[in-house]
Image: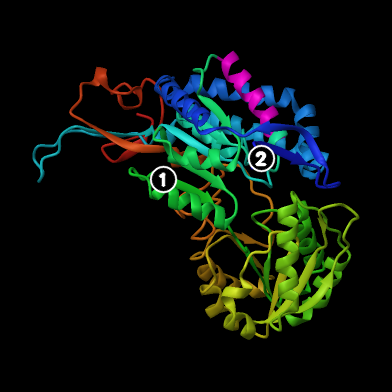
Amino acid sequence: MSHVVQGYNPRTGEPFGEPVAKTPDSEVDRIASAAAVAFSAWSVVPATDRAVVLEKVADALDAESSLLVSTADGETALGVPRLTTELKRTTNQLRLFAEVLREGSYVEATLDSANPDIIPPRPVLRRVLRPLGTVAVFSASNFPFAFSVAGGDTASALASGCSVVVKAHSAHPSTSRETARVVVDALRDAGAPEGVFGIVYGTEAGVALVKHPAVRAVGFTGSTGGGRALFDLAQGRPDPIPFYGELGSVNPTVILPGAAEREDIAAGFAQSLTMGVGQFCTNPGLVFAPESIVPALGEAVAASSGGAMLNERMCDSYKSGTDALAASDLVSVVSTGTRPDEAWAVAPLLFSTSVKTFEENLEKLTEEHFGPAALIVTYSSPSELHSVLAKLPGTLTGTVHAAESDHAEAGKIAEILRRVAGRLIFNAWPTGVAVAWGQHHGGPWPATTNPLHTSVGATSIRRWIAPVTYQSWPDSLLPPELQDANPLGIPRRVDGVLGVH
């Protein structure tokens, strides 16, 4: 068994960069233990001071953007324009959480005064959300910055007051190492406690991290199989811990009859399908559409190009999965796009089937093919979709394309989709996830392991904090968020009334 993690260039299949040593269990223990010690100091740093630290980390990453982007491009083949945008998204996430900390409502400060005259009598109760401890973050393969070492899980966990240990993804160890170097140096320069952020490498190190007693929660973005194994490990500990996994998603899109006449539908679909070689968790892999629009969708996909996938395993999985689907008698191949002459490159593929066949073989035909492949399910009347949409597995997004004449039906379909999807999109495509207060990036299993929480946006911080109620404590001994004078000036609910008081 190799003792190193080696990156590769997906365009050539050749090794890229220097190999990174896998982290032995003894070192995982040291890093996790150091993070637990750092948590004691970091968790009591005032939120406004933590905000400054996050902004300094963002500034440091921006300053090293040229090196980070070129390294990531060599290991992922995602391209400099895409990676440049992704790195800026990553630093903007850090800055968003600085805003969240300064605004202060994320702690949900709640103050109830005493009332001896009700049954049962109420003492003075003051409730606030406090950080859990050390968080293990598993990097994603398809976003080497935004869902990786300094990505959203890390940013939100550090913002909450938790310490973080990242498990680097094996597809881009050099990018992970360089990003971690920037983060560690920036944290140190900003005066954060030593050990508040650490990184480990290798599958075995990830397992050891989830099992480590210092770890109090886990964030994961990846495959359903890998996520389920780690979820079971987290739940099987002597002290089970929360596991927030973002796993598989087919992202159903419904094109209603009026919208099928729009000229931009086919081009928009193909662009969304092939973005990042289809390696997006919000890739529109399942489309319900009238038969009349299938030729236009097929032409758009045929005119599109694929590209190199992130690693050889993903390339092989895509090819084997789509080959098996094409060989079945359940679907027809509508069209195939262009495959570039690169080592781990694939071509876009479009399949079709009837709504009847789809419903009868739903489990098989809702398998995710991670890459630029989609299945068109044709229908004669939108009413045929009601029962089948309700049976879909949990998914991150549900999309409806509708003309004004379709609005009544669009409302009915939205009511069905909201039960299986975390974000509903109207007349747009699901790829692209804005980082904002109002974003929800989650959904029922297998989209995520916990549909109540999001992995993107301001409220993703909620995963790493838990409620504590202080009963009858003197004002001087309370956290500042709960003190009578509200020294932080944050929004609070006082005797049931929300405001800054």
- Which quarter of the figure has residue 225? bottom right
* Residue that numbered label 2 is attached to: 2
Answer whether residue 78 is magenta in the image.
no
Residue 259 visible? The answer is no
Spatial CA span between label 1 and label 2 = 31 Å
* Residue that numbered label 1 is attached to: 242
Find residue 446 and report its horizontal and vertical position in percent: 52, 60
Q: What number is the disc on residue 226?
A: none
Which residue of the protein is positioned furthest toward the right in this rendering?
341
Q: Which of the image's four quarters has the N terminus?
A: top right
Mark 1 residue element: loop
**Stretch in magenta:** 175-190
In terms of depth relative to the viewer, which is nearer, 416 or 210? 210
In terms of depth relative to the viewer, which is nearer, 37 or 429? 37
* Kind of residue at badge 2: Ser
Find residue 49 and report its horizontal and vertical position in percent: 50, 19
In terms of depth relative to the viewer, which is nearer, 443 or 223? 223
* Kind of residue at badge 1: Pro
- Asked if residue 347 lies left or right of residue 151, the reply is right
For image coordinates 78% across by 61% down, the residue present is 268
